[in-house]
Image: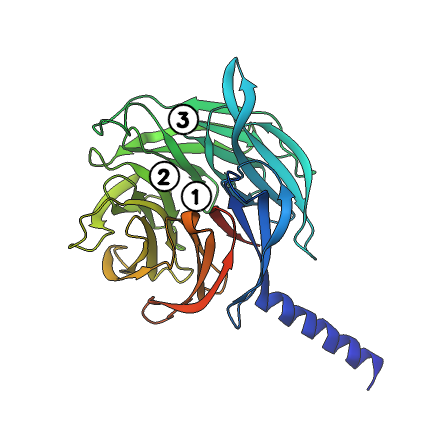
Amino acid sequence: MRPALIASLLVMTTSLASAREHLVYFGTYTKKASKGIYVARFDSETGKLSDPTLAAETVNPSFLALSPNRRHLYAVGEGGGANFNGKPSGTVSAYSVNPTDGSLAMINTTVSAGSAPCHISVTPDGANALVANYSSGTVTLLPIRSDGGLDGPAYVDQHEGKSVHPSRQKGPYAHSINPSADGRFAFAANLGTDKVYTYRVDPTTHTLAPAEPASVSLEPGSGPRHLAISPDGRHAYVINELANTLTTFALDADTGALKPLQTVPTLPADFTAQSTTAEVVVHPSGRFVYGSNRGHDSIAVFKADPETGTLTAVEHVSTGGRTPRNFALDPSGRWLLAANQDSDSVVVFAVDSSTGRLTPTGQSVTVGMPVCVRFY
C-alpha cells in the first residue's frame, strides 16, 4: 500500500475515533469517598462508559464548565475558606485539559466573590466565566486570561429580595447564570426571589449591565434553579426547584427579554411525597426537554413544539439511583448520563431520536457523590 494512502487512512481512522469517543468529566462533593474531579471515556456509538479516574484533586468541585475551545476546564469550589471584601467566599479554579488522557493541570484559583458558588458557565467568546453564589445571592464575572487562567472578579451583582417559602426563600439565593448563544446576554435564576435576571454582557470591559427589562418574575414559591436555551435561541426553559415545575419562555433575541408562555409539572399527578427538581437540558435537536426530580428520582421527558416551544409530557423514567442532581446528553444526542448524588452512581440511558424516550442500558459506574456531568 502506498505511504500516502496509509497516511490518509490513519487520519480518517483517528477522526472517526475522536468523533465517536469523548471524555466526560464529573464534578463531585468530596464529603465521602470522592477526592475531586473525575474523568471517563464515553463511546457515542456503543454507549460504553469507562470507569472514572481522578483528573484533579480538589475540594467540593460541585459544578464544571469547559472553555469553547476545550483547552480549559473551570470548577467552582464550595469548600469556602476564601475571603472577598471582608466576607466569606468560595473559589473558582482554572485547569488546562490534557486531551489524551483527560487529566487536569491547575492554572490558578481565585475567589468567587460570594459564598457557596454552585454554578459556572463560560461566555461563547471564551473571554469570561460567570458564577452564581447561592448563599450570598450574588453573581460574578471573572475575566479569562489568554493562558486560560482567571483574573479576579471584574463585576459582582448582589441580588435583593425574598419570597413566600418559609425556609427556602428568606433571602436571595442565586442558583445559576447562563449566557445566550450569541454571548450578548446572561440569564441568572434566583431561587430565593422567584426571578430570572437578564444582563447585557460587555466583552470589552468584562462587565454585566441590567437589560431592559432587568428581570422576569415566576409564580411565588417556584424557586427557579437552572435555565436552558433552545438550539434556535427562540425559547428558554427554567426548572423550578420548589414548585416542581418547568416554565417555557419566549426569548427576544434583540432585548434578552423573557416572556412566560407555559408552566408544566415535572412530577406525575399521583406522586405526593417530597421531591425537588434540579437540572434542565434541551436535546440538540430542540425537539425534547428533560428535567430531573430528586425524591421521585426520575427524569421527566417532554416533547417541545417546534413553533411555540411549549411542552407536552412524554414519560417519567427512574434514574436507577437516588437524588439525580445533574445529567447531560452526549454531543450526538443519542445518550443521557444521569448522576445520582446519594447513591454514588452515574447511569447510562439510550435516547430514542423520534420520541425522546429514555431506555436504561444496564450500564452504570461508581463516582462518589456526583453532582455535575460535562462532556468534552
Percent position of residue 84, x then y: 54, 18
Residue 135: mark? 3
Q: Which quadrant of the figure contains the N terminus?
A: bottom right
Task: Please name whichever residue, 317 or 341, is drawn nearer the observer in this view of the structure.
Answer: 341
Nearer the N terminus, badge 3 or badge 2?
Answer: 3
- For label 3, the SS is loop
| Spot occupied by residue 266 in the image (x, y as percentages of width and height) | 25, 51
Q: Amino acid at mark 2?
A: Gly
At 25% across and 45% down in the image, what residue appears?
Answer: 244
Residue 230 appears left or right of 111: left
Mark 1 or mark 3: which comes first in sequence? 3
Give coordinates of residue 229: x percent, y percent: 38, 49
Ranked by sequence position, the earlier of labels 2 and 1 is 1
Q: Residue at x 37, y 41 (%)?
A: 254
Residue type pointed to by label 1 = Ser
Depth check: give the residue in front, 71 or 183.
71
Residue 121 falls left or right of residue 192: right
Residue at the outermost bottom position = 1
